[in-house]
Amino acid sequence: MRAKCILCDQVDKIEPFSLLAKQLRKKRKLSYLCDDCSERITQQTNERKKDGNFNLYKEEKTEDYIR
């Protein structure tokens, strides 16, 4: 299976029966990132975490009770 990176438009071959290929086929909205772009984003995120410029916004969970 061929997948195209959404950032650099590089086309990579992935095994057709791998977990990633199955996820890409099943969930069309799932985006594919090549290894280089994924590593670059991870590195930049870790640098922002060290600097203190990283905010992680979590959704507030509400507990619904059934009565």
Image: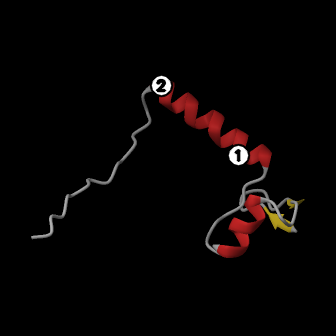
Of the numbered discs 2 and 1, the one sitting upstream in the chain is 1
Q: Nearer the viewer, residue 63 or 42?
A: 63
Q: Residue 7, position in %: x, y? A: 72, 57
* Residue in view at x 78 percent, y 52 percent: 34
Q: Around disc 1, counting alpha carbons within 10 Å, would you say few (fewer than 14), some (14 to 19), or many (20 or more)? A: few
Position of residue 32 measured from the top left corner of the image (x, y, whole percent):
72, 60
Cα separation between marks 2 and 1: 20 Å
Q: Is residue 54 left or right of residue 44?
A: left
- The quarter of the picture where residue 2 lies is bottom right
Asked if residue 9 is positioned above or below residue 27 in the image, the reply reads: above
Residue placed under numbered mark 2 in the picture:
51
Q: Is residue 57 above or below residue 12?
A: above
Q: How many marks?
A: 2
Residue 4 placement (x, y as % from top left)? 80, 65
Q: Residue 26: give x, y in percent of width and height.
A: 67, 74
Q: Is residue 54 above or below residue 28?
A: above
Taking depth in this image into account, of 19 and 60 the one nearest to the observer is 19
The crowd level at tag 2 (other Cα within 10 Å; few <14, some 14-19, many 20+) is: few
Left or right, residue 18 beside residue 41: right
46 displayed left or right of 62: right
Task: Please name the amino acid that badge 1 sits on.
Answer: Ser
Q: Is residue 10 above or below residue 47?
A: below
Q: Which residue is mark 1?
A: 38
Name the residue: 77% across, 65% down: 21
Name the secondary structure under disc 1.
helix
Say which quadrant the N terminus sits in: bottom right
Q: Give the residue type that dot 2 points to.
A: Asp
The local secondary structure at tag 2 comes to: helix
Tell me the quarter of the picture where residue 33 sits: bottom right
State the residue in front, 23 or 65.
65
Quarter of the image for the C terminus: give it: bottom left
The residue positioned 32% from the left and 54% from the top of the image is 59
